Every structure is written in C-alpha cells, then in structure tokens.
Amino acid sequence: MYIYGKEVSKTTREELARHVAEFGSRYGRVPCLAVVLVGEDPASQTYVRNKILGCEEVGIRSISRVYEDGTPQETIAQELRALAADDAVDGILVQLPLPKGYDERYLLSLIPDSKDVDGFSPNNLGLLCMDKPRTVSCTPFGVMKLLESTGVSLAGKHAVVVGRSNTVGKPMAMLLLSADCTVTVCHSKTPDLSAFTRQADILVVAAGRPKMVRADMVKPGAIVIDVGINRVDGKLCGDVDPDVESVASYLTPVPGGVGPMTISMLLYNTYRAAVARENA
Ligand code: GUN
C-alpha cells in the first residue's frame, strides 16, 4: 500500500493555517520565511518554488533571494547577516546543495539557531542527539509523521537507514532511536547491503541512487520510506524500485511521498520559530 505524503500533510497544513491565522491576530504580524537560492539547478528551483507555494497555502509570508552561480560568497554572506538581523524574518533557509566553490558550512553558520528552520545547525542537530529536540530537520521529521500515519507502533522495531548525510541519514537515525527502534545505519561502504535491508521492519532509504533497493532486498511486510528523488531519462524516480510495493506493507511513492511532507514540516518549523521568537 502506498503512503501519500500529500494526503498525510493535508491535515497538518490545514491545522497550521489555523495556527498561523491565530498567530496573526495575537501578534499583529505574519510568520516569515526567507529562502536563499544560489545557482540555476532546475531541481533546486522546483523545490524552492514549492516551498514558496507552501508558504502561500498556509498564510506564511515568504521572501526569496536568488543569486546567479558565480555571485561572490561575501555578497550572499552579507544578505544572510541582514536576514539574521531582520526582526520581521523568522526562518532562513539556504537551498542545498550550493554550487561548487561555495563554503556551505560558513554560509550556514551565519543563520542563527533561532532562525534555522532546516534544523541543520550544530546546536539544533546536537539537541536532537541529546533527545531534547528544538528544530528538527524537515525531511526526517516528515518521515516520522508518515510512519505515524500508518498507526504501526515503532518501539522495538528494527529500523535500517540507508544513507548517513547530516541532513537526512543522521537525524533520521536519531529520531528512530528516540522512538525506541533498534537502528542500523548503512552507507555506500557497507558490504552486502541487502543482508541489512532484509532485516528491516522499517527501511528508510536516502542514498541518492535510483532504484537501488529492489524487492528481493526487502523483508515481507516492512514499511519502506523512499527519500530519494532522482531524474532518470527525464522522469522522477526514487531510490526504491516501485516493485517493492508488492513486498512491503507500506511504501512511499516518488513523487508524492516524502517531498510534500518535507515542505509541511518546513512550514511548521517556520511557525514554531515565529512563536519562539515572540516568546523569547
Ligand atoms: N536540499 C534538499 N533537501 C533540502 C532541505 O531539506 N533543506 C535545504 N535547505 N536544502 C535541501
């Protein structure tokens, strides 16, 4: 059975729209997200467009700052400093990956923890590791909501995460651990990957390799979450072969699975950042 992120996120967004409206009445302003895009990568342009449309849908104000590839790094740094200092801005997001030549860690370090709606800062990631989450990275957070939507209890389950990025794999493993799963993290240097994936009750794949997980690598009845978004011959596909749907109890489709949920959690994080800033 497929888990459709759009359906799961519908209630989240409706609820959020109500909270955003209440926030407006209470504080006399609207939460605001600033999105910074550098370069012309078509996938990044699409993601940014969808994030801005998501803001409109729930009543969050958005500001976008778009720079050509080749813009001096200090120009972008100055903009990030200005957004950091701007009281009207609650959240700042730099769309990743940045084009070659930009220092991602340096630029992201200019976003204050309180406005880090991606949950990428060392403090936000560290708090998550310590089971005291403040802002949780949008994709892993969205995956937890998708898992919750199945109604299946996670405690004691063996969760296998394929991928160890700071943005998805690592925070994903921490969230699953906090949900009392036994967690295994696999990556590109894991020998005999299928020996691990076949043990998974919950399999989260964020490897960035098209259709790398095939039906024979999945335990019957497993819940499989496909975080991959790859473009092959002009068509979008995930890291999981769609044939897995016949083996798994649940599978997220690509597109329409994790993607819409990630955006919903970004909107939620922006609203929460606005509330926290009003109450700081
Ligand atoms: N690129 C791919 N996913 C993400 C995300 O969640 N946040 C940002 N900033 N960039 C991304």
Image (cartoon, helix red, strand yellow):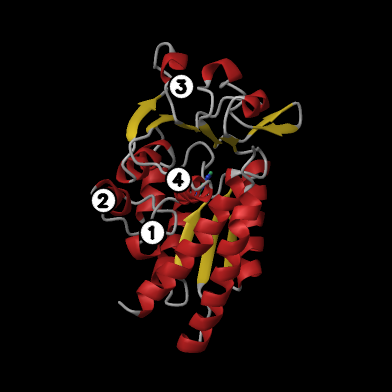
Residue under circle 1?
111
Q: Name the N-terminal-most of marks 2 and 4.
A: 2
Q: Name the N-terminal-most of marks 2 and 3.
A: 2
Q: Comparing marks 4 and 3, which lies closer to the viewer?
A: 3
The residue depicted at 59 percent of the width and 57 percent of the height is 9
Residue under circle 4?
140
Eyeballing the image, is 244 above or below 168?
A: above
Q: Are marks 4 and 3 in contact (CB under 8 Å)?
A: no
Name the outermost residue toward the left: 130
Residue under circle 3?
197
Q: Are marks 1 and 2 in contact (CB under 8 Å)?
A: no
In whole angstroms, how far apart are the C-alphas of marks 2 and 3? 26 Å
Q: Name the N-terminal-most of marks 4 and 1.
A: 1
In whole angstroms, how far apart are the C-alphas of marks 4 and 1? 20 Å
Count of labels in the image: 4
Judging depth in this view, the residue of 33 and 183 nearest the camera is: 183
The residue depicted at 43 percent of the width and 56 percent of the height is 77
Residue 185: name its quadrant: top left
Q: Is mark 3 within 8 Å of ligand 1?
A: no
